[in-house]
Every structure is written in C-alpha cells, then in structure tokens.
Image (cartoon, rainbow, N blue to C red):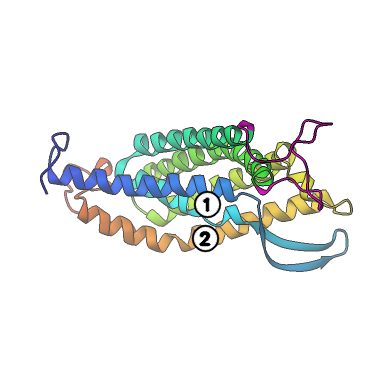
Amino acid sequence: MALHPIEASALHARRERVFLVIAGLFLGTLAMLNILGILRFITFGTIETDNWGELTFAVAVGVLPYPVTFLCTDLICELYGRARASAVVWVGLLLNAWVLFILWLGGVLPGFETIDTTTGDIARDAANRVPVFFEVRTLAFGATIASMIAYLLAQFTDVYMYHFWKKVTKGRHLWLRNNGSTLASQVVDTVAVILITWFIGGFAATITEDTNVAAFLITLILTGYVFKFVIAVLDTIPLYYLVRWLSRYLDIDPNAEYRHATDPGPESTS
C-alpha cells in the first residue's frame, strides 16, 4: 500500500497507527464508561458489621472498563513519552465535554414525550417514572461531570507518577512504575468520582431512607479501589508483553533517554 504524503516512512506510519489504536481504545472506553456510569451495580457479596449493619460490596458497571484507560496511558507513556500521554488526557477531557453536550442537546430538543401542562415537565408514567432516556441522562450527566473532575486529577497523577518512577529507576522495573502510578491515581479517582457523583450527580436519589450513607459511600470507595487494585496488578502481565512486543515492532527503545553512551546494549525492564 502506498504511503500518504504526510507519512515520512513505513516505520513512521506503523508507529502512528499503533498510537491511533491505543488512543482510540482509551477514548472509546472513556466515553463508554461515562454513559454506563451508575446505571447498574454489580455485587460481590455482603458482610455483617456491628456498627454499620449489613455492607454490600459492589461496583458500578461503569467501573468495569476503567482500568483499561490506565493500561493505555501507561503504554503511551512507555512508548511515546509524557507529552503524547498528556495530550491524550486532554483530548479525553474534550470527549467528556462532547458527551455532556449531546446529553444536554438530546434532552432540550422536542420529542414525542407528553408534557405535563401544570408543571411544564415531561409527564411521568403510571410507575412515576420519566422516559428511559431522561433517567439515563440524569445519571450519566452527573457521572460525566464527576468523571471529568476525577479523570483529570487521576490521569495526570498517573502520567506524572509513571514518569517519576521511570526517572527514579533509570528506566528499570517496569512493574514498579506501572503499579506505582496506577495504584496512586486510582485512589484519587475512586474517592473523587464517588463523592462528586454523590453530591452533584443524582446518586443520592438512588438511596433508600434507611441506608447508612457514610457506610454506603465508604463501602463503594473501598470496593471500587480493591477492584481497580486487583486489575492494576493483573494488567502488569499484558503491559510487559505489549511493551516488549511493540518495542520491537515499532523499533522504539523505551529507555533510550536513560542509557549511557558507552552502553548501547538493551537494559532490563524487570
């Protein structure tokens, strides 16, 4: 296949296409998790406590794909550098804003819904519920705003910590910068997104009156973080494989900046 004029070489084209795939996976996952948000919770069991009663360990369905975003940013950090990783994070923020705009636009444009003439709002059905889109819109709108704030804090923490550990270890110990950056950023993300969604995202409306709010939120934060912690540890394996394979495929030396001029040989990332 002939190269496009902007493609300097076959190798350059290959590198850009791989970057497009990783960035696309990152951005697609980001959009999906914001729409899924807190529409459903997946339970992992319950325990009885003396002070807080029965605690249910659960994660929002939107959390399921979220660890993939950190794997993607770690791959971009390792192969393409901090500037590219930061650029993708900013594009992700714009994508969040785009999702918010479409949610808003879809709600203000006229549709086939019946309007309550006394309040001017969309009429509720016999079960006192609005059409599904507006239920999804309310939860997704709040979750996306929360995600935008938590996302910026967490992703920039991830990028910063990844390169901090890479600099400290002189490019060695890939497992340390992968887990050290992700686990730190997941604390920021989990706490921020749960609390912000609770206060501004309509999360409180899903809670019954007899729920211990403090216990509920703490349980969600702990459960979400433990889930992300486990996934972060497990994704070390595919990260090692992908970095090793892509480094050869793309002819990129992830640790070139840390090599000594007198030591041109490969340096271990173990």
Residue type marked 1: Tyr
Is 43 part of what is drawn in magenta? Answer: no
User: From which residue to which does the magenta span run?
Assistant: 108-132
Mark 1 residue element: helix
Disc 2 target residue: 231
Check the image and name the residue furthest to the left.
2
Is 121 part of what is drawn in magenta? Answer: yes
Circle 1 or circle 2, nearest the eye: 1
Mark 2 residue element: helix
Q: Residue 66 carries which label?
A: 1
Counting from the top left corner in percent of width and height, residue 235 is at: 45, 60
Q: Residue 190 carries which label?
A: none
Look at the image and tell me whether residue 54 can be seen.
yes
**For the residue carrying disc 1, how many other residues have a C-alpha within 10 Å: few (<14), some (14-19), or many (20+)?**
some
Q: Which residue is drawn at 26% across and 40% down?
A: 257
Residue 79 against residue 222 in the figure, above or below: above
